[in-house]
Amino acid sequence: MIKIDAITLFPEMFSPMEVSIMGRAQKAGILDFNTVQLRDFAINEYGQVDDAPYGGEAGMVLRPEPLAQAIKHCQKTKTQSTVIHLCPDGKTFDQQMAQELAHKEHLILVCGHYKGIDQRIRDKYVDMEVSLGDFVISGGELAAMMLSDAVVRLIPGVLNRFESAETDSFSQNMLAWPIYTRPEEFEGLKVPKVLLSGHHKNIKQWQKAQALKITQEKRPDLLKKTELSDEDLRLL
């Protein structure tokens, strides 16, 4: 079981976590997902959690006191917690990171907003800083949901067939091979004969060759991270 707490100003944004695979994981007791309203730790009766930045820069910054109290509140429930700050300048999230986080007991996701969070929280309380890519969105909520989904689906018991996650794109530093379903012919396009043959060894070889080819065409950078065997090179 994994526990995930998302510290946020907008808990209502996390409704997608109640449906589909994430919803099933919660009902099965594999995932304990909670939102923590940052304003519950506001500095005054008006619910203030932000302030103007020093130095005269435009915009607002989330103050350190509410964030520190919210993180401490989440840490009370587990002895081993990993605090993750979702931000543009964090390490780029990838499948390998998702696999590593899937072994964690408790993730605390800090969803920034406005101009960001006070640097002192980043320095003292945050264990990891994670980015989804070289772009900026309005807050960390969407990023937190995407990270949670990518991590939780790798936990055994979440997917009906765990091997489905093991063959996803990026799992072996390669993109996925083409997939087909019924009918065998659609608008003049046919399913490759090898997939209809029932010959498992040939099917596996075809899938590997297609994955290598697609990765080489679309993401050759991924192959640079992989030690290709002589057989792989022949398939290319």
Image (tube, grey):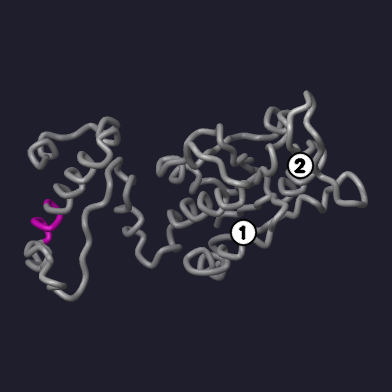
Closer to the camera, 123 or 107? Answer: 123
Closer to the camera, 169 or 81? Answer: 169
Q: In the rendered view, would you say 171 is above or below 160?
A: above
Q: Is residue 141 left or right of residue 68?
A: left
Query: Dot 1 corresponds to which residue?
Result: 33
Where residue 50 sits: x, y (%)? 80, 41
Label 2 sits on what residue type?
Answer: Leu
The residue drawn where x is 69% and y is 49% is 7
Q: Quadrant of residue 228?
A: top left
Q: Is residue 222 magenta?
A: no
Q: Label 2 crowding class (10 Å Cα cut-off): few <14, some 14-19, many 20+?
A: many
Name the quadrant of the C terminus.
top left
The residue drawn where x is 32% and y is 59% is 164
Estimate the spatial distance between the alpha carbons at disc 1 and disc 2, rounded to whole Å.
19 Å
The outermost residue toward the right is 45
Q: Quadrant of residue 18?
A: bottom right
Tag of residue 74: none
Q: For mark 1, give the secondary structure.
A: strand
Q: Which residues are magenta?
A: 200-205
Query: Dot 2 corresponds to which residue?
Result: 67
The residue drawn where x is 7% and y is 66% is 197
Q: Earlier in the sequence, mark 1 or mark 2?
A: 1
Where residue 79 sits: x, y (%)? 68, 44
